[in-house]
Image (cartoon, grey):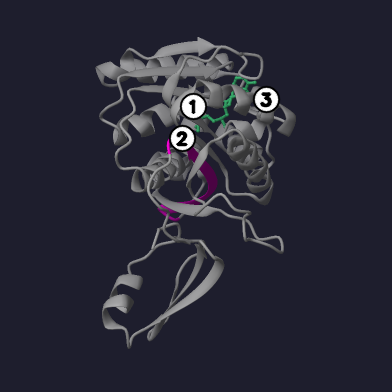
Amino acid sequence: MASANITQNYRNLKPSRQAITQITDVAAYLAARLPATYAATSSSINHVLQRFPEFEPVTMLDIGAGPGTASFAAFEQFPSLQNFILMDDNVPFLSAAQQLLQIAPTILARAKIINADITKWTDFTKSDFVIAAYALVELPLSHQIHLLHNLWQACTGVLLIVEPGTPKAYQSLMSLRQQLIDTGAYVLAPCIGHGACPLMNNDWCHFSQRLARTRIHMQAKGANVPFEDEKYSYLAVSRTQVGTSSSRILAPPQMGKACVELKICTQNGLENRFITSRDKPGFKKARKLNWGDTV
Ligand SMILES: C[S@@+](CC[C@H](N)C(=O)[O-])C[C@H]1O[C@@H](n2cnc3c(N)ncnc32)[C@H](O)[C@@H]1O
């Protein structure tokens, strides 16, 4: 029941402040939502790493941390990380984070937890890696803009925002992207450059991450298939300019017997690229490509 509510609340964009009020709500979130937010955040971090393999953050700030999802995801992918700060103002979420961190490896167990309203906080600790995962979506755009300004001041390396893969979240990310570019940020991903987004006609940039469902996850969601596809949007910006960007696949590749069709974002705008079986090596490579990959 609690997990059905969590899923329903997520679909209805109900903020955690109303949806998560007791420890049973957190338990439902851990079973029904965290696997997906973890998978989407891990996938976004992976895109950051593909663009910026030299990035070796030591300090991390997890904004709207909830149970610590983004910290756990970053810990998995960055062995360089030594210090974590988790910020949130939801007490049931924070006590779950505290308990989960206690049974995690020492570096995570040493994480500092700050109970604070992120929209009012102005003195964020300078950190190499700043992540806000599925948190800005709970704030009005004016608060997002104000918060982003403060987070960018605190960021010494990479700032990553992960959001649900909805048109509304994409629109907010586009406003925030422009705000960051105007203050000197370099866009790492998913965009190819700093120009205007070429998507039009109600199209929106988002990706999908498939994740396996455990038995508890399936029970919590009343699901009968052992996997789900989490749609997400994200934006990663950096303090330093990093190499040149490649093109990115913006939709599931259409795999035909003799042709693969890719919708890609390139330096010259949006393209539909067709790779036919006559180009044997190209076709072989194209058949292994996924939505979100760079080419
Ligand atoms: C959907 S949860 C995401 C949790 C976690 N980042 C994840 O990806 O699983 C959104 C989080 O943002 C936090 N949040 C929303 N508004 C906040 C505010 N004004 N101050 C502090 N935390 C806030 C909520 O308490 C909640 O933990």
Whether residue 66 is visible, yes or no, is: no
| Amino acid under disc 1 | Ala
Label total for image: 3
Q: Which mark is residue 241?
A: none
| Amino acid under disc 3 | His
The dominant secondary structure in magenta is strand
Whether residue 182 is visible, yes or no, is: yes
- Please indicate whether residue 272 sits to the left or right of residue 245 in the image: right
118 or 104, which is in the foreground?
118
User: Can you tell me which quadrant of the image ligand 1 is in?
Assistant: top right
210 or 179, which is in the foreground?
179
| Amino acid under disc 2 | Ala
Would you say the beta carbon of the disc 3 residue lies within 8 angstroms of ligand 1?
no
Would you say the beta carbon of the disc 1 residue lies within 8 angstroms of ligand 1?
no
Query: x, y (%) of residue 276?
Result: 38, 84
Residue at left offset 45%, top offset 22%:
61
Q: Which mark is residue 31?
A: 2
- Name the residue that disc number 3 marks: 146
Q: Is residue 226 magenta?
A: yes
Q: Secondary structure at mark 1?
A: helix
Q: Is residue 126 above or below residue 184?
A: above
- Name the residue that disc number 1 marks: 27
Q: Is residue 246 magenta?
A: no
Q: Residues within 10 Å of mark 1 (few under 14, many from 20)?
A: some
Residue at left offset 28%, top offset 18%:
107
The residue segment tinted magenta is 225-240
Residue at left offset 64%, top offset 38%:
176
Quadrant of the rendered structure where residue 246 is? bottom left
